[in-house]
Amino acid sequence: MKLKASLLSVGVAAVCSLPITAAAQEPVWQIGTFDRSSAEFAGGSPERAVHFVIGQSDPAKDWYADAPAFFVARKPDSAAAPRAITFSLQGKPAQAYRLHVALLIEHSSQPALGVAVNGHEGMFYLHPKLDYSMGDTVAAFFPAYSHADVEAEIPGESLRAGENRITLQAVATAAKGVPDAGFAYDAVELDRVANAA
């Protein structure tokens, strides 16, 4: 099930009843492949916060598959820190953009997805569907193995000509720490939307 949402200029608000228009979409950038597998990403945990630069960074070395959940009560660590994606737009931004984040749920506890676009923040609660595609074979036999997609419409005024930054973070929804809370990334994509409503 895909979560439809609208990124407002002052923050992020979920609008599940308003689907993103089926307008023509032109990819701006993509990290990974939408194949329900995280095999193309780095394994293990990053030694410092992830900062991925479009056109320079390598997904196999610079984007880590596993994203453990951030808990407010725990000591911060680089693996659970927000992951920054820096990219540049040439000229005036388009009227609207669409952010698509595909996730794999391979742990017993499911966090939310925190998203920030040039400092405008929002939270997306996942609605996973059981997955039988065996994309990540290490976790595919786990009874709760599933996938979730988050789609968000970003108004053009939230972006600017030149450098922009989007951050993504697994955020725990429980007050106390839960062992192995987190998700894995399948792919992330930003599209330019033509004739947006």
Image (cartoon, helix red, strand yellow):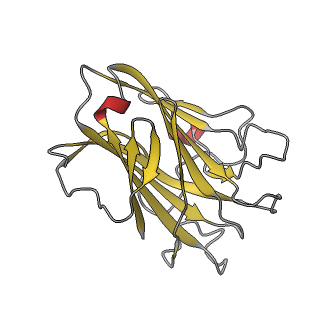
Position of 79 with respect to 9 (left or right) is right
Find the residue positioned furthest to the left: 195
Q: Residue at x 85, y 41 (%)?
A: 75
One can see residue 156 in this view: yes
Residue at point 40% right, 44% down? 7
- Foreground residue among 182 and 73: 73
- Residue 186 to residue 108: above or below: above
| 170 with respect to 150 (left or right) | right
Q: Position of residue 21 (x, y in %)?
A: 22, 56
Q: Position of residue 171 (x, y in %)?
A: 66, 51
Residue situated in front as seen by the camera: 151 or 185 = 151
Where is residue 42 shown, x and y percent of the image?
Answer: 61, 45
The image position of residue 161, as x and y in percent, is 32, 20
The image quadrant of residue 30 is top left
Residue drawn at point x = 55 percent, y = 53 percent: 185
Q: Is residue 32 visible?
A: no
